[in-house]
């Protein structure tokens, strides 16, 4: 299965700034996904990142707040914009070559906004 | 709308015990179910993937079963060790490339 390198692993950011999280996959994958995990909660899907097209956002998430890039089949970025303390979470990227094959996750980015 | 629930929410056991974690889902029309392990503040590590046509999968001390008709999966951990302490998540794939995650079981194995 694919291996995903995610960085940064953690960051402490000032309110009002932006942070870009990167995920690099060691093989070409069809779909990449971005999740948020708030403290003590399970994972919530932010968006599906499609190569060559706009990302598809879930209800409650918007492109202005969470712009996503997917320039090729092995790389994606998520930006958390104009951050507030409520954005403090773990952000995870995930990849799949097709749902039947299961999903692989990156190691996560632990974001704290102060 | 698919909903996934895990029971218990937290579990604390002495080392060496065999234990069972439960995962329930409301819509039996699934393609597969995947069990993950998450260490504090970290990403998810895939443990076992069960296709809808399978009844169980095994990896070392782990065994996962799937009963699609009743909407249940169990993860069996044999001879638990302190290193097994983590949060265990199940996730259900029902198509449209989306995984629906359970609420997780936080496991602590005491030495």
Image (cartoon, coloured by chain):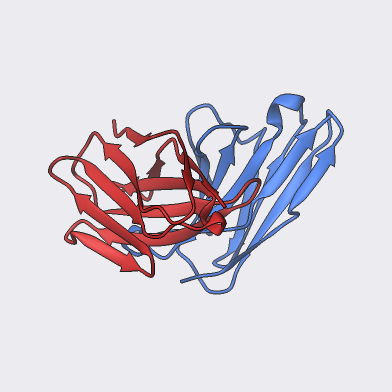
Chain colours: A blue, B red
User: Residue A16: percent from the left, percent from the top?
Assistant: 83, 29
Q: Residue visible at 77% across and 31% down?
A: A83
User: Residue B14: percent from the left, percent from the top?
Assistant: 48, 48
Count numbered badges in the picture: 0
Quarter of the image for the N terminus of chain B: give it. Answer: top left
Q: Residue furthest right?
A: A14
Q: Residue visible at 44% across and 56% down?
A: B16
Q: Nearer the viewer, residue B23 or B101?
A: B23
Q: Nearer the viewer, residue B111 or A2?
A: B111
Q: Residue furthest bottom?
A: A27
Q: Nearer the viewer, residue B57 or A31?
A: B57
Q: Residue visible at 55% across and 43% down?
A: A35
Asked if A26 appears above or below B36 in the picture, the reply is: below
Answer whether residue A31 is visible to the viewer in this image. no
Asked if A74 appears above or below B95 in the picture, the reply is: below
Residue B49 relative to residue A33: left or right: left
Q: Residue visible at 59% across and 49% down?
A: A92
Q: Quadrant of residue B77?
A: bottom left
Answer whether residue B105 is visible to the viewer in this image. yes
Residue A20 relative to residue A97: left or right: right
Residue B61 relative to residue B56: left or right: right
Q: Nearer the viewer, residue B99 or B56?
A: B56
Asked if A24 appears above or below B10 in the picture, the reply is: below
User: Residue B85: percent from the left, percent from the top?
Assistant: 54, 50
């Amino acid at each position: 299965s694919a291996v995903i390198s995610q960085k940064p692993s953690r960051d402490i950011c000032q309110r009002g700034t932006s942070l870009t999280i990167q995920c690099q996959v060691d093989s070409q994958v069809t779909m990449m996904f971005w999740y948020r995990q708030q403290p003590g909660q399970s994972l919530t899907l932010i968006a599906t990142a499609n190569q060559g097209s706009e990302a598809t956002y879930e209800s409650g998430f918007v492109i202005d707040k969470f712009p996503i890039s997917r320039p090729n089949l092995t790389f994606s970025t998520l930006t958390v914009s104009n951050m507030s303390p409520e954005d403090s979470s773990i952000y995870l990227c995930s990849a799949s070559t097709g749902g039947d094959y299961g999903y692989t996750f990156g190691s996560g980015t632990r974001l704290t906004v102060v | 709308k698919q909903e996934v629930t895990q029971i218990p929410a937290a579990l604390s056991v002495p080392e060496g015990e065999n234990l069972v974690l439960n995962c329930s889902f409301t819509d039996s029309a699934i393609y597969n179910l995947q069990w993950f392990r998450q260490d504090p503040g970290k990403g998810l590590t895939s443990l076992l993937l069960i296709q809808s046509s399978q009844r169980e999968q095994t990896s070392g001390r782990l065994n996962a079963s799937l009963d699609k008709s009743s909407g249940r999966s169990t993860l069996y951990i044999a001879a638990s060790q302190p290193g097994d302490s983590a949060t265990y998540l199940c996730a259900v794939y029902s198509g449209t490339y989306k995984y629906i995650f359970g609420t997780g079981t936080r496991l602590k194995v005491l030495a």
